[in-house]
Amino acid sequence: GQNIDQPTEMTATEGAIVQINCTYQTSGFNGLFWYQQHAGEAPTFLSYNVLDGLEEKGRFSSFLSRSKGYSYLLLKELQMKDSASYLCAVMDSNYQLIWGAGTKLIIKP
Amino acid sequence: IAGITQAPTSQILAAGRRMTLRCTQDMRHNAMYWYRQDLGLGLRLIHYSNTAGTTGKGEVPDGYSVSRANTDDFPLTLASAVPSQTSVYFCASSGTSGGNEQFFGPGTRLTVL
């Protein structure tokens, strides 16, 4: 079966750095996406990795290791507005997105 | 309109009733999707359409149907609603069905009693 695993909840302090991990087992791989979802709102796109390595975009970076079936999202200089759920999704061999249940990130002052 | 819209925002429905959730995008995207999101579970794909005139079944299609008569609209119909269909429904679109980001509508919160 296809499976995406990520921690259910994480807590971090404003101004700090947090790493959210995602491991996956899917039938085929056509890229990995990270989305942010604030409570009661729609998911919004953060990053896309299809090759191994680190993609940096401002305060957010995403890493991929295809051989390990592993990705992480790194958030730096945390702000209160970063409190949200972070969704990991893998595009499988049929070009369908398989979604993890999301990681709820709580930022404390 | 700009982006992708859904209607209604929320709905309470009696079991057994028929309901259509509307989704419209103005980005001229070829691919469109319907997901449901339930607490503790990831987004699950109900149906998709890679281009106007074609549709396909996702992970959880039973009890739902879709149509794609044109590029912009992708309605989702519940023929006879059941309580297990209580969920938040998101419509999304992308330029192609390949490795492009999906843009999401604001969602419809549906409660079936």
Image (cartoon, rainbow, N blue to C red):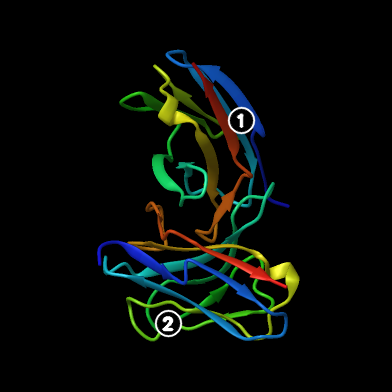
User: Picture coordinates of residue B108 (x, y %)?
Assistant: 51, 65
Determine the chain carrying the residue at label 1.
Answer: A
User: Picture coordinates of residue A28 (x, y %)?
Assistant: 58, 50
**Element marked by disc 1:** loop
Question: Quick one: label 1, few (<14), some, or many (20+) residues within 10 Å?
Answer: few
* Disc number placed over residue B68 in the picture, else none: 2
Which residue is painted at 46% across and 16% down in the image? A14
Q: Amino acid at mark 2?
A: Arg
Count of numbered badges drawn on the protein: 2
Could you say which is closer to the camera, residue A83 or residue A17? A83
Tell me: residue A71, above or below residue B80. Answer: above
Determine the chain carrying the residue at label 2.
Answer: B
Question: Quick one: label 2, few (<14), some, or many (20+) residues within 10 Å?
Answer: some
Residue wearing tag 1:
A68
Residue A105: which quarter of the image? top right
Q: Please say whether residue A70 is visible from this viewpoint.
A: no
Separation of marks 1 and 2 at Cα, in angstroms: 39 Å
**Element marked by disc 2:** loop
User: Picture coordinates of residue A10 (x, y %)?
Assistant: 61, 25
**Left or right: A19, with A46 as reference point:** right
Which residue is painted at 44% across and 23% down in the image? A75
Residue B74: which quarter of the image? bottom left
Q: Amino acid at mark 1?
A: Lys
Q: Please say whether residue A108 is visible from this viewpoint.
A: yes
User: Picture coordinates of residue A90 (x, y %)?
Assistant: 54, 47
Tag 1 and tag 2 share a subunit: no
Tell me: residue B2, above or below residue A39. Answer: below
